[in-house]
Amino acid sequence: MIAGNIAYAERYKKMGGGLETALAWLEKGDFSVLEKGQAEIGGGLTASLPCVDLKKQKDWEAHRKFADLHFCLEEGEIISSMDVKLVKDFGEYSEQNDIMFAPATGEGVRVPMHKGDFVVVFPEDAHIPAVAIDEEKTIRKIIIKIPM
């Protein structure tokens, strides 16, 4: 897992690859292409601008083919992450959706999201996005899928 803020993007872009492409796109700040749904942003990366319901309790999720970059546009969310090997009872993996779920047990590392913050979770990182810091509400955020 990587957690940072777009203000320090240059530091993280030096890691190269899909992370560099994703952060360069986020720095431009023109997300109008996402109003119609998912968009290809280069290098096989896709970005989306979903409405996300923040809840007090959510399940673990994990991916095998993609890393997720979660970018905060509106505050109120906590994202947790833990080594996928430490999470028990994952259900069936959906090849089509590149996702599997497990009941939330253990906390892992918790990252409260503030405007401009991002979290990157890799296939080895089980994660629980969309947990409410305080009130349950709906927010908009950007999720970028980075092929691994």
Image (tube, rainbow, N blue to C red):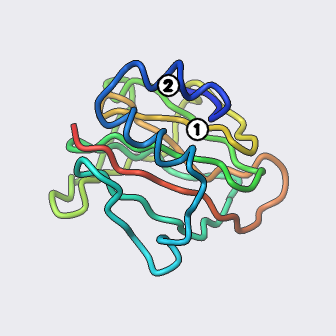
Q: As displayed, is residue 132 above or below residue 127?
A: below
Of residue 126 and residue 105, the one placed in the foreground of this image is 126
The amino acid type of the residue labelled 1 equals: Phe
Q: Residue furthest front?
A: 28
Q: As displayed, is residue 49 above or below residue 21?
A: below
Q: Residues within 10 Å of mark 2 (few under 14, many from 20)?
A: few
Q: How far from the left and from the top, in percent, is residue 65?
A: 20, 44
- Quadrant of the snapshot with the C terminus: top left
Q: Secondary structure at mark 1?
A: strand
Label annotation for residue 118: 1
Q: Is 37 situated left or right of 112 in this image?
A: left
Q: Is 56 situated left or right of 94 in this image?
A: right
Q: Residue furthest left?
A: 95
At x 52% / y 44%, what residue is drawn?
128
Q: Secondary structure at mark 2?
A: strand
Q: Residue furthest bottom?
A: 36
Q: Residues within 10 Å of mark 1 (few under 14, many from 20)?
A: many
Real-space Cα distance between discs 1 and 2? Answer: 8 Å
Q: How far from the left and from the top, in percent, is residue 27?
A: 57, 44
The amino acid type of the residue labelled 2 equals: Ile
Q: Quadrant of residue 83?
A: top left
Q: Quadrant of residue 140?
A: bottom right
Q: How far from the left and from the top, in percent, is residue 119?
A: 54, 35
Where does label 2 land, which residue?
2
Of residue 23 and residue 91, the one placed in the foreground of this image is 23
At x 67% / y 31%, what residue is drawn?
7
Instruction: Tell me which numbered mark, 1 or 2, is placed earlier along the sequence.
Output: 2
Badges 1 and 2: C-beta atoms under 8 Å apart? Answer: yes
Label annotation for residue 10: none
Of residue 98 and residue 74, the one placed in the foreground of this image is 74
Q: How far from the left and from the top, in percent, is residue 77?
A: 70, 48
